Every structure is written in structure tokens, then in C-alpha cells.
Image (spheres, rainbow, N blue to C red):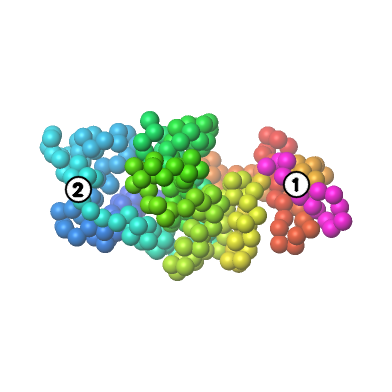
Amino acid sequence: MEKQDVPAAVPASIGDPVAAVERANALVSAVLSGLLKRKRSIAAALMYVLALGRDVRANCWDLSEKAGLEPGDGRFHRLLGRYRWSWECGREMLPLLAQEALGAEPDDEIGPGLAVDETTDLKRGTATACVSPQHSGVTGRTENCVTWVFSALVTSAGQCWAWFDLYMPGCWAKDPARRKKAGIPRDLKFASKPALAIEQVRAVIARGVRVCWVAADEVYGRSGEFRAACRALRLSYVVIVPCNWKVTLAKGTAPVSAEEAARDAVFERRSAGKGTKGPRWGWWALLATEDPDEYILVRRLEREK
């Protein structure tokens, strides 16, 4: 298949980002209005959100300076330390907010889907709720951190978080005294990451968001319960499995690793979509398995062929 000349970008006007920022600010203001009662509180919260950025340290003094407040202004300290609002209510708003923010894309041929993944916050000490030495995808190694499992709504226009949960490691689940000190409810039970993801997918769909497919890494691909839950919800899914994952290609044959199954596969050169430098080409193969509802999809990068 010959490489086609596909433009990697489209012309944009200065009005496009301005309108997008104004629309985003309006959506954030609407959410804050549903969480806080006083106008001063809503205004302070909006200033706080707008001040957040990669170039600002996560403390109130730096954020106050970024927001243009006078030195010593304790507005953000009061916002975080004294104002009362429900993060649970905020999470409830996320699914429909994400759907509204992304909008409808008439050229989206596959429809909206959910990408399930984790993110971590690196921490010092042991006092933060659910902190423990665990793998951090941010650094690629074991870190003292807290882990969030999240589901992001994805369309051809972009992606937005639609649900999230703080993952509670087993060492916390089995330590009532430590949980009490950190303010973790007694009735909160341990749940694996795939179990959290299953409930997240169900929660997003239950709130009226259109979801056609799910994508996730091997933490979830290894879980038969997660894949079964997607099928029960009539969702297509693409999940990563390791190369040594055992698969039966046909009834009556012995299981082989995914790597072995791919050795004799017939590959086609296809694009996985547009990147910043144009189409993202790779070599792809699709292998049937004994389960008529599951296939092995293999990708080899250009440099691996």
C-alpha cells in the first residue's frame, strides 16, 4: 500500500482558540456554580482553576501570584481549607460535562469511547491517604505515590475525564487504624483496578453518555472479568495483553503465546490515524481465536518490519 499525502494540520484562525477558551471557562463556571453557593466562592474557585498550569508550583502562594492577587492574599488558602463542597457531586457532573465539552463530531466514524488508565501523584511520607510504594506510570518505576484509576471520554475532537477513583492498596485496606487517621470511610472496601474500571464504565453509561467502545492497557486486558463486563454492556474493546499471554487460536489446538501466534501472521500496512507529522503508519495483523467474540490484533512499528 502506497503512502498517501494526507495533510497533518488544517488552517486555524485566532478566533478559534479564543472561542474555545471562553466556552471552557463557561463550562467550568457552570460546574463550580453547582458545587459552591456564594458568588465570591465561585469566583475564587474559577481563579484557582485558571491559575493552574505546568509552570506553576502547586502551592497557594505561587497560584495567588499567577492569578494576580496581592501578596499575602489568603483567598486560595480559605478555598482549600475552609470552603465546603462535595467532590462526589463534582464527579457526578463529569460524564455529561465531558460529552458537552467534546461535542458531536459528524465525521467521527467509530463514535465516542472510553479510555481506561491510571495516573499517579508522587508523595513524600506515609500520611497521605492510600500512599504506598507502587508502580508509577509517570516515571516507569516503583515510587511512593497515590494512584488514580480514571475513564476518559474520547472522540475525534479530543478527550476529557469522565470518572475517577482513588485506588486503595491492600496495605491500607487491612489497616483500620491508619484508615481512620486518614479519614477513609470504614465501609469502603478494597477493589482491584479492573473492578474499579468496570464500575466506572457502568457509571458513565448509566448517566446517559453515549459510549461505543473501550480501550485499556494490560492491567485490564489480563482481566477476564473486565472483558466480560464490556461484552455484557455490548461494547467493542481493544485491550493490551503481554507477548506471553496464552491464547487458543482454534478449538482442539494447544494454547500458544500471543508472540508465537503472530509469527506466521499476514501483516498489512495501515495508518492508526493522524499525528503531528502526518499519518502514523504501522504493520497490522488480525488473528481469529476459538472465542468468536475475541481476536488478537498485532501491530509492528515501521522500524520493526
Q: Which residue is mark 2?
A: 82
Which SS class for mark 2? loop
Which SS class for mark 1? strand
* Figure quadrant of residue 128: top left
Nearest the eye: 200 or 100: 200
Chain-order first, disc 1 or disc 2: 2
Report if residue 137 lies within the magenta region.
Answer: no
Residue pictured at 51% horizontal, 63% vertical: 202
Q: Residue furthest front?
A: 177
Q: Which residue is mark 1?
A: 246
Q: Is residue 60 above or below residue 21?
A: above
Residue pictured at 19% horizontal, 60% vertical: 37
**As shown in the figure, which amino acid type bears the numbered disc 1?**
Lys
**As shown in the figure, which amino acid type bears the numbered disc 2?**
Arg
Horizontally, is 282 left or right of 99 in the view? right
Horizontally, is 56 left or right of 300 in the view? left
Question: How far across and how far down the image is residue 8, in percent?
Answer: 52, 46
User: The magenta stretch spans which residues?
Assistant: 242-255
**Real-space Cα distance between discs 1 and 2?**
53 Å
* Figure quadrant of residue 280: top right
Nearest the eye: 100 or 185: 185
Report if residue 251 lies within the magenta region.
Answer: yes
Q: Check disc 1: other Cα within 10 Å, few if <14, some if 14-19, many if 20+.
A: some
Horizontally, is 38 left or right of 272 in the view? left
Nearest the eye: 19 or 117: 117
Question: How far across and how far down the image is residue 129, in percent?
Answer: 38, 42
Q: Check disc 2: other Cα within 10 Å, few if <14, some if 14-19, many if 20+.
A: few
Horizontally, is 225 left or right of 108 in the view? right
Nearest the eye: 25 or 85: 85
Dominant secondary structure (helix, strand or loop) of the stretch shown in magenta: loop
- The quadrant of the rendering that contains the C terminus is top right
Residues at discs 1 and 2 in contact (Cβ within 8 Å): no
